[in-house]
Image (tube, rainbow, N blue to C red):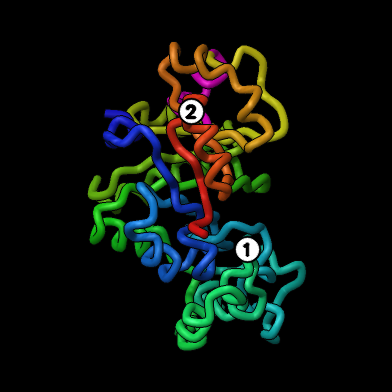
């Protein structure tokens, strides 16, 4: 069974990096806050210097951790330059109250008071998020971030070793903007559910392109959502989603157009 066939609901919402409008993104606090506010969770994965998987979106650490306040910081603070133990020592939560990136704390005094007592947040491992997802019976969309310094085959093999530790206890969709990763994963595990993330422009002959990648789903940015050949993709068995859309009216238009999943920040 494919990932999207797990759901009876035809209008799905994915919690983008957890409920990141109300908790620091890609932390256990953000995913726990997303319980009941999305059909599945989306999270971003990269490899550390010592080849361990860690949950973080940016290539560098300064936006969502306290790395700049630490003497051991190695500019330009790239995730790939730190081993797992060093990454796990960082605080990935305190920035959120300071920056209030969605303005939610300014609008909600109760939420601001709650987050003032939020304990320091580690960058989680995929296993920790999977354990939480298992507890709440929430499927996961694991996005592999582009890591140009690593070979696609190496990334695919490492990723499959990592998810093997989940023992099939969590339903998974694997996505990436690096479609070489998808093709490598499909060659090694044809059963794995894959989605191609696309922004900017569409590849020619999109259904055939996705078939070569092994992808059964396609996630596009909002500008591309109005250009996507949805009927052609549906006929090819491709499920489509849009990122990142927080406006309720726009979400409704996209669902009416035929998109199955909307990625949103949980505002």
Q: Is residue 118 magenta?
A: no
Above or below for 38 versus 32: above
What residue is shown at x 52% (from left), y 25% (from top)? 257
Instruction: Please state the horizontal and vertical placement of residue 193, each as a whole percent of the image.
Output: 38, 33
- The crowd level at tag 2 (other Cα within 10 Å; few <14, some 14-19, many 20+) is few
Is 216 one of the magenta-colored residues? yes
Secondary structure of the residue carrying tag 1 is helix
Task: Please identify the quarter of the rendering in which residue 62 is found.
Answer: bottom right
Give me the C-alpha separation between circle 1 and circle 2: 40 Å
- Residue position for label 1: 79
Question: In this rendering, would 200 be left or right of 206?
Answer: right
Total tally of numbered discs in the picture: 2
> 10 Å neighbourhood of mark 1: few (<14), some, or many (≥20)?
many
Marks 1 and 2: which is nearer the front?
2
Quadrant of the rendered image containing residue 28:
bottom left
Q: Which mark is residue 260?
A: none
Asked if 192 appears above or below 93 in the picture, the reply is: above
In front here: 198 or 261?
261
Examine the rendered structure and indicate whether residue 15 appears above or below residue 69: above
Label 2 sits on a secondary structure element that is: helix
Magenta residue span: 208-218
**Residue under the image location 63 percent in, 69 percent down:** 103
Residue at the far front: name it.
249
Q: Position of residue 59 (x, y in %)?
A: 66, 57
Residue 212 visible in the shown view: no
Dot 1 or dot 2, earlier in sequence: 1
Residue 164's spot in the image, x, y percent? Answer: 31, 47
Residue 256: give its label: 2
> Foreground: 50 or 109?
109
């Amino acid at each position: 069974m494919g990932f999207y066939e797990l759901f009876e609901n035809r209008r799905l919402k994915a919690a983008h990096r957890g409920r990141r409008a109300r908790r620091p993104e890609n932390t256990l606090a953000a995913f726990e806050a997303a319980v009941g506010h999305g059909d599945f969770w989306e999270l971003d994965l990269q490899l550390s210097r010592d080849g361990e998987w860690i949950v973080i979106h940016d290539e560098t650490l300064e936006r969502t951790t306290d790395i700049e306040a630490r003497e051991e910081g190695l500019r330009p603070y790239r995730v790939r330059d730190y081993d797992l133990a060093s990454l796990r020592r960082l605080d990935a939560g305190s920035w959120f109250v300071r920056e209030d990136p969605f303005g939610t704390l300014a609008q909600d005094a109760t939420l601001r008071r709650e987050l003032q007592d939020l304990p320091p947040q580690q960058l989680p491992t995929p296993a920790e998020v999977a354990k939480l997802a298992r507890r709440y019976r929430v499927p996961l969309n694991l996005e592999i971030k582009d890591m140009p310094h690593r070979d696609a085959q190496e990334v695919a093999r490492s990723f499959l070793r990592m998810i093997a530790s989940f023992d099939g206890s969590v339903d998974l969709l694997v996505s990436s903007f690096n479609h070489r990763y998808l093709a490598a994963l499909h060659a090694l595990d044809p059963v794995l559910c894959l989605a191609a993330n696309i922004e900017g422009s569409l590849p020619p002959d999109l259904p055939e392109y996705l078939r070569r990648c092994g992808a059964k789903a396609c996630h596009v940015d909002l500008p591309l959502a109005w250009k996507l050949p949805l009927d052609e993709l549906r006929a090819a068995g491709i499920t489509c989603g849009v990122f990142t859309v927080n406006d309720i009216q726009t979400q409704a238009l996209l669902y009416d157009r035929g998109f199955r999943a909307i990625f949103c920040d949980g505002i």
